[in-house]
Image: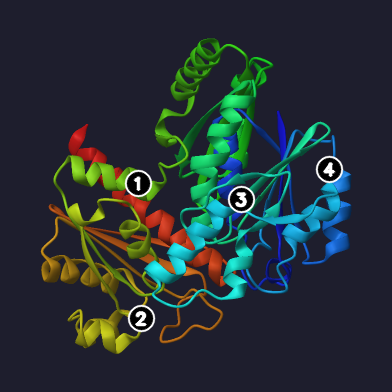
Amino acid sequence: MKATIVTIGDEILIGQIVDTNSNFIAKELDRIGVETYEMISISDDKQHILNTFAQLQNKVDIVIITGGLGPTKDDITKKTFCDYFDDQLVVNPEVLAHVTELIEGFYKRPISQLNKDQALVPSKCTVLHNKMGTAPGMWMKKENTVFVSLPGVPYEMKYLVENEIIPKIVKEYKRPYIIHKTILTYGQGESLVAERIENWENNLPEFIKLAYLPNPGRVRLRMTARGTDKEELEKAIEENVQSLDAIIHDIIVGYEENETIETVVGKLLAKNNKTISTAESCTGGKIASLLSSVQGASRYFKGSVVSYATEAKVNVLGVSQDLIDQFSVVSAEVAAAMALNVKNILKTDYAIATTGNAGPSKGDSKAEIGTVFIALATPEGVITEEFNFGQPREKVIDRATIKSLEILQKEILKIVQ
């Protein structure tokens, strides 16, 4: 079963907003064995929408559209649906009752005609009830293709996908199984990883595909198996994961899509009842942002000091001005002092500190652009490492962030092995 996801909105095409809806929908479809054939973003133009529908007709099994269902004149999806399906808009009493209750009961204001018009839907459609907002979803079939229209507001779209679309697809369609397994590796680049596992990859069964998903300092290896026998697929995936682990055990830090390095580190900290703090300069709080993004992070992450300017390192963290004058603000000595001081201030077991020249200018130090010192204060002492992550600036920050968490992860593992 194949699907195409279509987002409607000029705001996406001009870069005003980022399309996160397609990503969410694709993951939900994949979870039930529906393959996303393509993702398309198109303008708020009636003819453009009609042409897109015609091109997709009988090409895929289901087309999921988001956007263009609001109450204003630029929201034209419902009327375009009517044109494509040779239909007309009618008032749906259930939707009207819901919209009235939402506007008058919850928002405590008189309902307008624009609000009432949200209850207008094509007469031939199956209405998908939207408890989160005023715009209902619409399900319509023409020949061999189902067209589903959803509001573009992310939380409304997610509700309809999870509670209306997915259950309906599962009930009405027979689908193959798609099994994924994502192996997370850190510390080696894509080409080196590929070289190490070349023979293993060449011997994968035909129904298992491998994809490399590289990021600065890390490579995710995603195995995908498709077929009709779920148990057979899961068994084959697990056997091949075990044989892969025997080859690159030293760089594997976790599994599955949601186990990023910050998740892996968080689990290690929580499991061992250890805490972490950060003192960041060149990374600007990005390490703290990643650590705190994990659900349950309050168990182990105590806080951060973003001491971007030299005076903040002195006045807030208490780094000695004499130390900075002697060794430079970008140095192993200053990084170590930052880590030790924030560890003491926030009373944590571990503390990460970064100081460096991310570029494009050198700032308060003469160190080469791309130079970063990372320090990790542990219960036993402090470790410092020097790196040059090159350019551009974003690359330096990303690599320093990931490398910091990688260093932390390796140190925590020492206490559990």
- As helix, strand or loop, the secondary structure at mark 3 comes to strand
Which of pointers 1 and 3 indicates the residue nearer the eye?
Answer: 3
Give the amino acid at mark 1.
Answer: Thr
Look at 34% across and 43% down and name the residue there. Answer: 264
Which of pointers 3 and 2 indicates the residue nearer the eye?
Answer: 3
Is residue 18 visible from the viewing direction of this image? no
Give the amino acid at mark 4.
Answer: Leu
Q: In this view, does 410 lie above or below 72?
A: above
Which of pointers 4 and 2 indicates the residue nearer the eye?
Answer: 4
- As helix, strand or loop, the secondary structure at mark 1 comes to helix
Label 3 vs 4, first from the N-terminus: 4
Q: Is residue 83 above or below residue 333?
A: above
Q: Name the residue under label 4.
A: 56
Label 4 vs 2, first from the N-terminus: 4
Colouring style: rainbow
Which of pointers 4 and 1 indicates the residue nearer the eye?
Answer: 4
- As helix, strand or loop, the secondary structure at mark 2 comes to loop
Q: Name the residue under label 2.
A: 308
| x then y, percent, for residue 151 | 60, 58
**Residue 309 placement, left or right of 14:** left
Q: Do the residues labelled 4 and 1 touch (CB within 8 Å)?
A: no
**Quick one: label 1, few (<14), some, or many (20+) residues within 10 Å?**
some
Q: Name the residue under label 3.
A: 137
Find residue 263 and name its label.
Answer: 1
| x then y, percent, for residue 61 | 75, 33
- Measure the alpha-carbon separation of dots 1 and 3: 35 Å
Is residue 320 visible from the viewing direction of this image? yes
